[in-house]
Image (spheres, grey):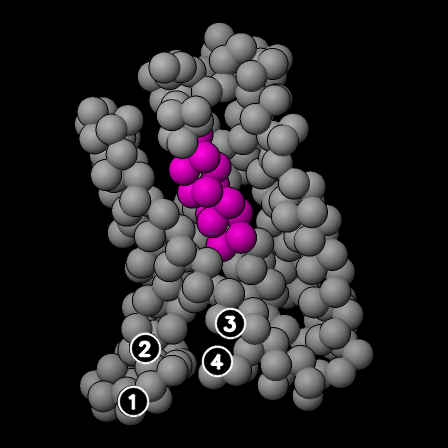
Amino acid sequence: MASEFTHPPERYLAESAVSSRIWNLWMPVGAFFLVPFIAWYNEPFFRMWFASEQTGILEFIHFFFPLLTGLIALRLLFTPLVRGDNFLILWCSLMVVGGIFLAGEEASWGQHYFEWATPDTWQGVNDQQETNLHNVSNLLDQLPRGILLAGIFITCVIYPWLLINRPGLLPRRFDFTYPPIALRPLALLIVAASIYRLVKKSGYVDGYLNYRPGEFQELFIVWLLLYYALFLYWRERSLHR
């Protein structure tokens, strides 16, 4: 059974060549332009069917994609490849915890769907009076987001270039975990959304995107995390072909 997934470079490129560009390129690019257009063109419609915490498509994606990511990682924990490697056990366990935590936080641990009342004591410390942690302080919101963004840029933008042009610089020990080059378009869209978020804060484009820039950025983050988990699952399955 092959145990190298990204070496030589030809193997790394071939893995993404068989993936559908519809899912990891054209759909994300289309969403990148379509979401701001709908938010600008018909804000009431967008608020009801895209951004509403109860009925919004995007808000549901922010919850559902991390949940799927965690469940796929949980499935990987029971595979022979992962069970036999302590580092992969730790890696997939972190994906399980991270995916479930992101999903829970996005839905305020069920409050968005079951609409329970926030306790008075929690309302006093939560910016949006919800039962989640990320609205309690910037430390619990911006710091984890910043770390995640830096990790995505390094592993999904820089690593692919290294794996193709300088594969010897990256240790083979972590070969299974290196993101495929197919995720680079999504990573670049996250960078673009991050730039837009900074521009939006400057006030130069007020009124164009009637949707919180952070939520727009989050759409592509959870999209990338789900695809990453799926690629790891496909890599593990490739051992049994």
C-alpha gap between disc 4 and disc 1: 13 Å
To which residue does mark 3 refer? 59
The amino acid type found where label 4 is placed reads Glu
Q: Are marks 4 and 3 in contact (CB under 8 Å)?
A: yes
Q: Which residue is mark 2?
A: 110
Marker count (numbered) = 4
Q: Which mark is residue 116?
A: 1
Instruction: State which region is magenta.
Output: 222-235
Residue located at (35% from left, 67% from top): 105
Point 56% across, 73% down: residue: 57
Q: Which label's residue is closer to the chain start, 2 or 1?
A: 2
Q: Answer whether residue 225 is magenta in the image.
A: yes
Residue 177 visible in rendering: no
Name the quarter where the C terminus is drawn. top left
- Label 3, label 1: how far apart the Cα atoms are: 18 Å
Q: Quadrant of residue 132?
A: bottom left
Residue indicated by mark 4: 53
Q: Is residue 82 left or right of residue 239?
A: left
Q: Quadrant of the N terminus?
A: top left
Choose the circle earlier in sequence order: 3 or 1.
3
